[in-house]
Amino acid sequence: MTQTAHPASLLPTLPGSAYTDPEVFAREQGLILERMWFCAVRAADLGGPGAFRTVQVGRESVLLTRDATGAVRAFLNLCRHRGALVCTEESGQVKRAFRCPYHAWTYGLDGRLTAAPNLVRMPDVDRTAYGLLPVRVREWLGYAWVCLADEPPSFEEQVIGAVTERLGDAGAVDHYQVGELALGRRIRYDVKANWKLIVENFMECYHCATIHPELTRVLPEFSNGYAAQSYVGHGAEFAGAAQGFTVDGSPGAERIPGVAPEQDRRYYAITVRPQVFVNLVPDHVIVHRMYPLAVDRTVVECDWLFLPEVVESGRDLSPSVELFHRVNVQDFDACERCQPGMASRGYARGGVLVPSEHHIGEFHAWVTAALRPHGSTH
């Protein structure tokens, strides 16, 4: 059967198998998730030396902690003895070391092997060489980003560059003081859909008038179907009647002092590939981190960040949180409705993108290129 030619208004999508084939997902884990900078945890979640969190990055469990100096460290969550998980909990606190529960090999907060049964009888064992395997880590915007690649891409190009490309100004995001904000609320969503469906959904607004009544009341231009991400430097303007970025149009929290006048009463959305969404409004910032766990399952952790004094005051943040929580639920429900269709014979060759979604075609081209065998141009 030959591919039907589409009119110029419609661009083809990826085929359905890109969202359902475990082999495709395994290649994405190895060639995308494990090669790029991955936003792992909020740095403040690692409150002090010995605080830890484990996260799934591609096929690997990664252990993040703070060492005795307060520096963030990242390691493969893997005992060097027999390969057991050193930490089975998602988060916690240790005093001075991580102890594998299988054979009691013990590692310092710097990853060095510090103890093991009968270790003193093995003086030829180099305690650094047999320590936890380190993972590169960077801190930015108050988050710890990790990269599993032997030769990581430039953080400035991949991460900071994505934000600069969207906002059109390298310093525009600094106005929001994201690294100094405090966590007002965190909600975790377990989405039964492929991670790319979630990225594609976030990038377009063709669906906004259909499923986001609360959002389009605050951002009326979204009713036209064009996403703000389609335009460099553009932020969607609040409706005249909206006093804040809230579910009921009520005033939000205190404005972040650094926000420039031209950024006031505007919403900016940024995609940082492969798994981060950043949403900027004058009084808070919303950060989504995706953890693709299976070809049809993605955990999304969403943080609402406000000025520290706003969070410490105990004020009711629910009007601000509820707006994007509803958007999230609406979006993830839509992605879950799409996931079964990806396996349909009717979607074997994929679907189509309308003009307001054409920028998603660039995302598809990026994914395709990333999965191409090294050195291949086909």
Image (cartoon, helix red, strand yellow):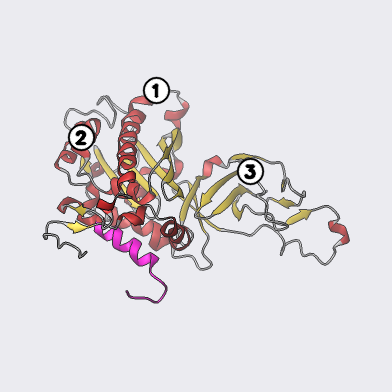
- Report the residue marked by disc 2: 216
Judging depth in this view, the residue of 16 and 151 nearest the camera is 16
Among the two numbered marks 2 and 1 on one chain, the one whose residue lies closer to the N terminus: 2
**Is residue 151 shown left or right of residue 177?**
right
Task: Specify the label residue 376 is tagged with.
Answer: none
Residue 162: horizontal and vertical position, in percent? 34, 57
Mark nearer the viewer, 3 or 2: 3
Q: CA distance from mark 1 to mark 3?
A: 35 Å
Image position of 166 (left or right of 148): left
- x, y percent for residue 145: 49, 53
Residue 316 is marked as 1
Q: In percent of the image, x 11 and y 60: which residue is there?
A: 8
Instruction: Give the residue at mark 3.
Output: 88
Residue count near mark 1 (Cα–Cα under 10 Å), binned few <14, some 14–19, many ≥20: few
Q: Amino acid at mark 1?
A: Asp
How dense is the environment of label 3, judged by Cα within 10 Å: few (below 14), some, or many (20 and up)?
Answer: some
Count of numbered circles in the view: 3
On whether residue 53 falls in the magenta region, the answer is no
Proximity of marks 3 and 2: CB atoms separated by less than 8 Å:
no
Using residue 8 as the reference point, say whether residue 257 is left or right of it: right
The residue at 32%/74% (across/down) is 378
Q: Which residues are magenta?
A: 361-378
Mark in the foreground, 1 or 3: 3
Label 3 sits on a secondary structure element that is loop
What's the CA distance linking mark 3 and mark 2?
43 Å
Question: In screen coordinates, is 313 left or right of 328?
Answer: right
Q: Quadrant of residue 166?
A: bottom left
Image location (x, y in percent) of residue 109:
68, 50
